[in-house]
Image (cartoon, coloured by chain):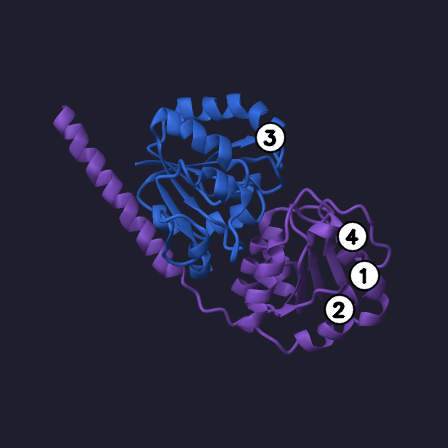
């Protein structure tokens, strides 16, 4: 199985790295932002890098060709993301292309979903949260199965 | 050594950087700061903007105390090294983040006793004096999450293998 791990370059990357043993035995690659952590990422798996989209809708739209290019070239079976906003274009393009998706809300979200979580909830095939008390704020699809910490 | 961490977030966290720089001469410890996108540049403390993951790990492992924004990355790293941790949540009203979710994390973790939370930087000096005794005590549920995900991915793979066999 080919798995694409999508994350921004700070805490969301640190959270993703906590889960690498869940994907052992599968072909994994990253899609993340340019940063001084590129070498660290490449030490774990192959990686594609792009400019930080921040929370800007304009940058997300501008980033779409890169997202399409990565997914077209790699054709992953599954996309896994814990945010941040970089997950939004990936999950919507994945929906169109029929690629399965798992969104795991960041560990830093306890009483409210992130903006990214709310936006990808309708299209994610599996939606996990890392604090049980957050379930009351989500739809029925959301599940709690533990945390990265 | 006291390590100050504000992460990769695109907004500044001058409130914390400025206060820690002001306290530096009187702390009796070397202070090293990762200032990220903050605009204030420290005069007393040693600082850098960003670095790679290994250096952050190394510094966190060496530090006597970490003072960080209340974000997943910095907290995960400090818990891993069992370094005493003071978190100061970034707040929306100061233009430090897009919302106030760091407040939730600071409250939850200080409630279970894993970290010391400071909401007003004027209380940092006092917190620094007591934080040295504290230690991270978070009960991990990582193994459960990893096992669930592994099971889910394996099931997906088995299902797609069956579909391929039928198609073939």
- Placement of the N terminus of chain B among the 4 image quadrants: bottom right
Instruction: Identify the chain of the residue marked 2, using the numbered disc in the image.
Output: B
For the residues bearing labels 1 and 2, Cβ distance under 8 angstroms: yes
**Crowdedness near tag 2: few (<14), some (14–19) or many (≥20) residues, C-alpha within 10 Å:** many
In the visual, does B32 lie left or right of A46?
Answer: right
Q: How far apart are marks 3 and 4 (CA)?
A: 26 Å
Give the colour of chain A: blue
**Crowdedness near tag 1: few (<14), some (14–19) or many (≥20) residues, C-alpha within 10 Å:** some
Q: Find numbered disc 1 in the image and state the secondary structure of the residue it sits on.
A: helix
Percent position of residue B66, x then y:
66, 64
Percent position of residue A100, x then y:
34, 35
Q: How far apart are marks 1 and 4 (CA)?
A: 8 Å
Residue at the (18%, 31%) spot, across then down: B163
Instruction: Identify the chain of the residue marked 3, using the numbered disc in the image.
Output: A
Q: How far apart are marks 1 and 2 (CA)?
A: 8 Å
Residue at the (59%, 23%) spot, across then down: A62
| Residue linked to disc 4 | B14
Q: Distance between the residues labelled 2 and 4?
A: 14 Å
Chain whose colour in the figure is purple:
B
Residues behind callouts 2 and 4 on a single chain: yes
User: For this rendering, which residue is in front, B21 or B31?
Assistant: B21
Q: Distance between the residues labelled 3 and 1?
A: 34 Å
Residue at the (80%, 72%) spot, across then down: B28
Residue at the (54%, 64%) spot, across then down: B79
In the visual, does B22 lie left or right of B145?
Answer: right
- Which of the 4 image quadrants contains residue B10? top right
Q: Residue A57 carries which label?
A: 3
Which of the two discs, 1 and 4, labels the residue nearer the N terminus?
A: 4
- Placement of the C terminus of chain B among the 4 image quadrants: top left
| Residue linked to disc 2 | B124
Q: Residue B19 carries which label?
A: 1
Instruction: Identify the chain of the residue marked 1, using the numbered disc in the image.
Output: B
């Amino acid at each position: 199985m080919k798995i694409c791990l999508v994350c921004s370059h700070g805490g969301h990357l640190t959270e993703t790295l906590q889960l690498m043993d869940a994907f052992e035995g599968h072909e994994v690659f990253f899609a993340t932002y340019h940063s001084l952590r590129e070498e660290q990422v490449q030490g774990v798996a192959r990686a594609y890098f792009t400019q930080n989209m921040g929370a800007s809708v304009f940058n997300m739209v501008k980033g779409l060709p890169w997202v399409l290019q990565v997914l077209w070239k790699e054709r992953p079976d599954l996309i896994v993301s814990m945010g941040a906003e970089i997950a939004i274009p990936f999950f919507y393009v994945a929906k169109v292309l029929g690629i399965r998706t798992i969104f795991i809300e960041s560990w830093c979200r306890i009483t409210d979903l992130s903006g990214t979580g709310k936006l990808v909830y309708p299209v994610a095939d599996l939606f996990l949260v890392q604090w049980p008390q957050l379930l009351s704020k989500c739809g029925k699809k959301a599940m709690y199965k533990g945390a990265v910490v | 050594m006291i390590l100050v961490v504000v992460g990769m977030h695109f907004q500044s966290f001058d409130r914390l950087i400025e206060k820690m720089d002001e306290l530096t001469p009187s702390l009796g410890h070397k202070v090293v700061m990762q200032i990220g996108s903050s605009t204030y540049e420290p005069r007393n403390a040693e600082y850098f903007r960003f670095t790679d993951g290994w250096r952050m790990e190394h510094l966190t492992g060496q530090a006597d105390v970490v003072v960080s924004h209340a974000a997943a990355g910095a907290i995960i790293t400090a818990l891993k090294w069992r370094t005493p941790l003071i978190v100061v949540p970034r707040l929306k009203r100061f233009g430090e983040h897009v919302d106030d979710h760091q407040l939730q994390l600071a409250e939850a973790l200080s409630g279970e006793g894993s970290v010391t939370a400071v909401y007003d930087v004027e209380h940092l000096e006092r917190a620094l004096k007591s934080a040295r005794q504290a230690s991270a005590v978070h009960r991990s549920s990582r193994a459960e999450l990893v096992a669930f995900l592994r099971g889910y991915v394996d099931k997906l793979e088995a299902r797609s293998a069956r579909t391929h066999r039928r198609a073939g």
